[in-house]
Amino acid sequence: MLSISDPAAMREHARDVRRGGRRLGFVPTMGALHAGHLALVADARTRADAVVLSVFVNPLQFGPGEDFARYPRDLPRDSGLAERAGVDVLWAPAPDAMYPEPPRVTVQPGPAGERLEGAVRPGHFAGVLTVVAKLLHAVEPDVAIFGRKDFQQAALIRRMVRDLGFPVEIVVAPTVREPDGLAMSSRNAYLDAGARAAAAALPRALATAVEAFRAGERGGTALSGRARRVLEAEPGVAIDYVACVAPDTVEPVEAVDGTSVLALAARVGGTRLIDNVVLGAGLEEDVRVGG
Ligand code: AMP
């Protein structure tokens, strides 16, 4: 595995790979790698001849008072995991190399970026789209893989690529979950034992809504109400939002169909967690590790 930090060196290497006629796959991450990230790498390997994994904790997407400073960083560990997963190039740029000066021009996410996560975290998606645009420009991959766990982010990236004409295929891969259903997240490392136990209410809430959907319930408010009550019954879980939305526009839907997404965010022992499910697919479409 090759390790690169300089963005110019990354660009040059990626061009060499493509000039050699090899398809390039790209998996952007913020590091603190877990089985969810590694599943994206495995997916990329089936679609490309060489895989680039980036590790960059993007300051632009964190708000004041969020966890930028304490976000888990362990490049030697990430490097070992990436190599064992079959990553060809680990690209970990320094913040100054990505942002030699604060950008004055950024990518604005439009209306779908103002809902859910965007409403709770103003500026977050402009930060995400700006860094993803920069990362894509440096790597120029044929295909880039994102996780459905961050479904709103994935929807906005698809839209950016379409609206701004990025020559890349975007793939959105299923969520990898712990044996009890909790979605894997680098932020799970913040949870103490009590919070970790309480966090199991999140996938339980999603499963309850899926069950009601399967039993014939089609009201968005009724379905999100079911999920909400599961969260409310768990002391130590504080809800940010629970909503049924359309997968692309992220607009609230009342007449739900199988493509609708039930999305939620909650704070558990001071840690903010998000999760979602496509109601027609259920949690079975996702991947469970261990257990
Ligand atoms: P992050 O490092 O959290 O910014 O995530 C990097 C990529 O991994 C994003 O595309 C995420 O959606 C994806 N990802 C995060 N958690 C999971 C998971 N549990 N399963 C699958 N993909 C994930």
Image (spheres, grey):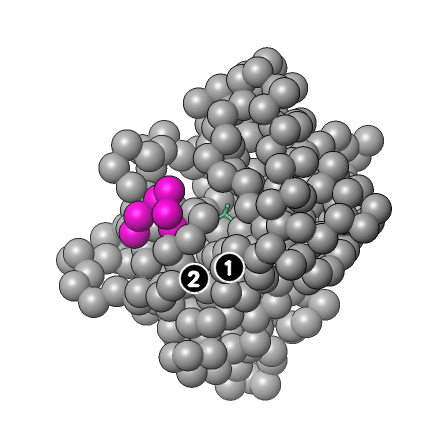
Residue 59 position within the rendered picture, expressed as x and y whole percent measured from the top left: 30, 46
Q: Are marks 1 and 2 in contact (CB under 8 Å)?
A: yes
The residue wearing badge 1 is 250
Q: Amino acid at mark 2?
A: Ala
Q: Residue at x 16, y 58 (%)?
A: 101
- The front one of 115 and 51 is 115
- The front one of 42 and 4 is 42
Q: CA distance from mark 1 to mark 2?
A: 6 Å
Residue 178 position within the rendered picture, expressed as x and y whole percent measured from the top left: 71, 34
- Let me know if residue 231 appears in the view: yes
Q: Look at the numbered disc 2 and give the secondary structure of its residue.
A: helix
Residue 211 position within the rendered picture, expressed as x and y whole percent measured from the top left: 79, 42
Q: Which residues are magenta?
A: 118-123
Image quadrant assignment for residue 193 = top right
The residue wearing badge 2 is 112
- The front one of 147 and 81 is 147
Q: Earlier in the sequence, mark 1 or mark 2?
A: 2
Q: Amino acid at mark 1?
A: Val
Q: Mark 1 Cα within 10 Å, few/some/many (few <14, many 20+)?
A: many
Q: Residue at x 48, y 82 (%)?
A: 167
Residue 283's tag is: none
